[in-house]
Image: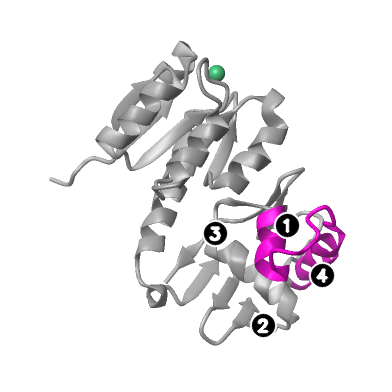
Amino acid sequence: MSQKLTILIIEDERNICDFISTSLTAQNYRVLTAQNGKSGLSLIASQCPDLILLDLGLPDLDGLDIIRQVRSWSAVPILVISARTQEKDKVTALDLGADDYITKPFGSSELLARIRTAIRHACRMTKTAESGQIFCCGDLYIDFVKRKVTVRERDIHLTQIEYKIVLFLAENNGQVVTYDALMARVWGPYAGSDNNRILRVNMANIRRKLEDNPAEPRYIQTEIGIGYRMTEGDIK
Ligand code: CA
């Protein structure tokens, strides 16, 4: 019998907490719950959950402070549960090291898909770098070793910058990547983070090369005001 994965829910709204808890238990996860930040933090330390679902608006602590604290010593996947009123905090949460977010109200299938992606991603990160060499998603293939991108076996010629953008998104496939994280990765920490224009120009070129219809992208989705998300694929 395989060991159950443990998920900690830190959420003060009782009905949301119960709804998530029921959906996860039905999927054979072991569920822990905390109604405030302090008991959440102590459960993280004592129970070492495999994933944390974190509401940003808690009665005692700011969810962002919890991310900051946890990230100082742990790489456990953190999925933020946010309300519409916390749009700005989502970006901050991601830049502090949260893995992804889900906006209330959400359905259980969306939540379960996000959880599976975050856990898969965390498992991949702990494997050796050479374990994954090829990313594939539909007709898109990226060979990390040969640095080659193909769509339906047709070679796609990307500039150095465009390749770096696509590579970073593919490494995080299925998860959102913020504009700032992408800018820092491609242009370095001194890229003016308020200047996303160069990123948008590059993305338009990438989509023209990769997508059949750049207006309805299949591979790279825009998360308005946040960043981009590469459609989930496989890394082999
Ligand atoms: Ca709340």
Residue that carries the numbered disc 4 in the rendered image: 205
Whole-percent x, y for residue 43 in the image = 31, 29
Give percent across and percent down for residue 84. Answer: 69, 25
- Magenta-tinted stretch: 180-209
The amino acid type, in three-letter code, at marker 2 is Arg
Disc 1 crowd rating (10 Å Cα; few below 14, some 14-19, many 20+) is some
| Quarter of the image where ligand 1 sits | top right
Name which of mark 2 and mark 3 comes first in the sequence.
Answer: 2
Residue type highlighted by circle 4: Asn
Cβ–Cβ under 8 Å for marks 1 and 2? no
Q: Position of residue 62 (x, y in %)?
A: 56, 26
Label 2 – label 3 distance at C-alpha: 24 Å
Q: Classify residue 21 by image quadrant.
A: top left
Q: Is residue 203 magenta?
A: yes
SS label for mark 1? loop
Nearest to N terminus: mark 1 or mark 3? 3
